[in-house]
């Protein structure tokens, strides 16, 4: 399954109900499922939440992975893309919840303090796991505090994203 996995850019500005492929344990082992982003609010009529602070918490069940090639965020009117400096793709550590009371099965992504590159733009970031860590997260074979950490300085390549349509109507990005 993992060899056929494709990772795409993850934009922080996507709608909360945007559907993405996640990886999780199902009844027959590891499976891929397409779920909307955003868990049910705690209060009736409240806003769904898509990010969950990871520090100091345990996640003994319903863990998932969200494959990504990069993540994008806005800062002071500009958009930036963060990808691993070594060119590899990665996973975000996440949690999913079954459907309940009119709310669909959905997922959220865990956050940690920002690493050195991301901290220039935001104080927190989504928890990035390298591909070699995927089963440690799903299997609960390593404690959360060993996995949910900012990556070391130099782990990310940062590029400004230009959002004006290019002549072929695809997003234009500078080459590094």
Image (cartoon, grey):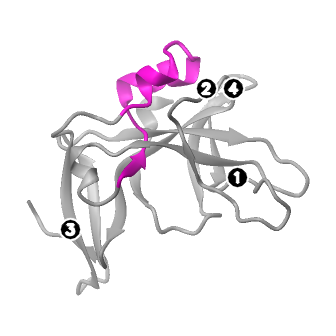
- The residue pinned by badge 3 equals 160
Nearest to the eye among marks 2 and 1: give it: 2
- The residue pinned by badge 4 equals 61
- The residue pinned by badge 2 equals 58
Which of the two discs, 3 and 4, labels the residue nearer the N terminus?
Answer: 4
Q: Residue furthest right?
A: 101
Within the image, what quadrant is residue 30 found in? top right
Label 4 secondary element: loop
Nearest to the eye among marks 2 and 4: give it: 2
Q: Give the alpha-carbon distance from disc 1 to disc 4, as whole Å.
A: 15 Å
Label 3 secondary element: strand
Q: Give the alpha-carbon distance from disc 2 to disc 3, as whole Å.
A: 35 Å
**Label ID, residue 39:** 1
Q: Give the alpha-carbon distance from disc 1 to disc 3, as whole Å.
A: 30 Å
Q: Alpha-carbon neighbours of circle 4 within 10 Å: few (<14), some, or many (≥20)? A: few
Magenta stretch encompasses residue 126: yes
Residue that appears at 30% across and 71% down? 79
Which of the two residues, 104 or 78, is positioned nearer the viewer here?
78
Q: Is residue 167 above or below residue 136?
A: below
Which of the two discs, 2 and 3, labels the residue nearer the N terminus?
Answer: 2
**Residue segment shown in magenta:** 123-149
**Label ID, residue 70:** none
Which of the two discs, 2 and 1, labels the residue nearer the N terminus?
Answer: 1
In this picture, residue 124 sits left or right of residue 172: right
Q: Residue furthest top?
A: 141
Residue that appears at 57% across and 53% down? 20
Which of the two residues, 70 or 156, is positioned nearer the viewer here?
156
| C-beta proximity under 8 Å, tags 3 and 4 | no
């Amino acid at each position: 399954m993992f060899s056929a996995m494709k990772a795409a850019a993850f934009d922080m500005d996507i709608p909360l109900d945007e559907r993405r492929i996640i990886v999780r344990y199902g009844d027959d082992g590891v499976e891929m499922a397409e779920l909307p982003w955003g868990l049910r609010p705690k209060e009736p009529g409240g806003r769904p939440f898509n990010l969950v602070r990871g520090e100091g918490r345990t996640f003994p069940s319903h863990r998932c992975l969200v494959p990504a090639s990069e993540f994008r965020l806005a800062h002071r009117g500009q958009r930036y893309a963060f990808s691993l400096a070594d060119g590899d793709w990665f996973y975000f550590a996440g949690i999913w919840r079954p459907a309940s009371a009119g709310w669909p099965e959905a997922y959220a992504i865990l956050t940690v303090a920002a690493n050195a590159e991301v901290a220039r733009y935001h104080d927190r970031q989504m928890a990035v796991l390298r591909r070699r860590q995927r089963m440690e997260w799903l299997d609960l074979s390593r404690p959360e505090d060993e996995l949910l950490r900012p990556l070391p300085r130099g782990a990310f390549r940062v590029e400004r994203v230009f959002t004006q349509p290019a002549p072929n109507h695809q997003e234009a990005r500078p080459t590094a």
